[in-house]
Each structure stands twice: as structure tokens, then as C-alpha cells.
Image (cartoon, rainbow, N blue to C red):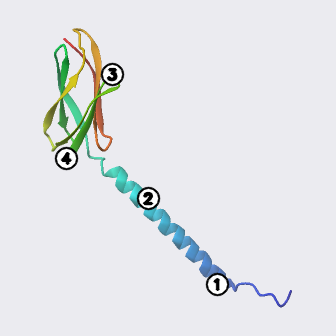
Amino acid sequence: MKNEKGISPVLAVLLMIAVAVAAALITYAWVMTYLESTTSRAGHAIQIQSVSFTATEATVYVQNVGDGTIVLTNSYLDGTLKSTFDQSLGEGLTWPIPVDGSYVSGGEYKLKVVCDDGTFTSGTYTMP
């Protein structure tokens, strides 16, 4: 066994350092990508300002109360998808969304509006 040689201690330490640096770089790249995708929509927010009802339609007035332009994509009535659209909305602007349905006086309805990045607003409203 005296003829078999192992790696020198210096080379072993250099290999361990190289592996540690590579692992740190991979972890850094993953964390930065994750944070970038998570924080890109952190400033986005929408809010339902008001709802008006008729017997066959509710008009939901949605305002962009966050930072930057958002894109409204879907509206829901009581958990059911009612309409799909592609409406850009700048900061501070309001847009009316018609939601077809059958509405009765005194009835409670859950309305929800969703953006393309997953931002949403919802609420339960009673028809007068």
C-alpha cells in the first residue's frame, strides 16, 4: 500500500473551496431570480371602488391603487368565471367591468377581479 498515493492536502482543500464557491453561486442565482419574480408585483394593487346593479348586470368599478400599470384579465361572480378581457389600467385610473348575471334585490353577490400577474380584489356586495 505504500505505492498508492492520495491527493495532497493542499489540492484537497482547493477542491473543497471550489465546490463551496460553486454551491454559493448557484444558491445566489436561484435566490436573486426568485426575489425578482416575487417583488416585481409587490407594488401592484387594485380595489373595487363601487358596484352598481341592474336585474341582469353588475358594473364593477375597479381602480389601480398601486404602483405601475396593471392588466385586468378576469371577473368572477360567486366563484364562477364570468368574463375574460385584457385591459391595461394606469396608476390611479378606474375602469368599469360589466358582469352579466341574474341579480335580485337584497341578494348578496361575491365579485372578484383578477390581474394577469395574480393580483386580485374581491368583495361581497348586496343589490339594493
Give the mark nearer the N terminus: 2 vs 4.
2
Tell me the CA gap for discs 2 and 4: 26 Å
Tell me the residue that label 3 is attached to: 78
Residue 92 has which mark? none
Secondary structure beneath dot 4 equals loop
Give the mark nearer the N terminus: 3 vs 2.
2
Which is closer to the viewer, label 3 or label 2? Answer: 3
Q: Residue 79 at what x, y percent from top left?
A: 35, 25
Quadrant of image for the N terminus: bottom right
The residue at the point 21 percent across, 8 percent down is 105
Tell me the residue that label 1 is attached to: 11
Could you tell whether 59 is left or right of 16 in the image?
Answer: left
Secondary structure beneath dot 2 equals helix
The residue at the point 40 percent across, 60 percent down is 32
Could you tell whether 98 is left or right of 74 in the image?
Answer: left
Check if mark 2's residue and mark 4's residue have beta carbons within 8 Å: no
Specify the farthest residue to the right.
1
Q: Say what amino acid the circle numbered 3 marks.
A: Asp
Tell me the residue that label 4 is attached to: 69
Give the mark nearer the N terminus: 1 vs 2.
1
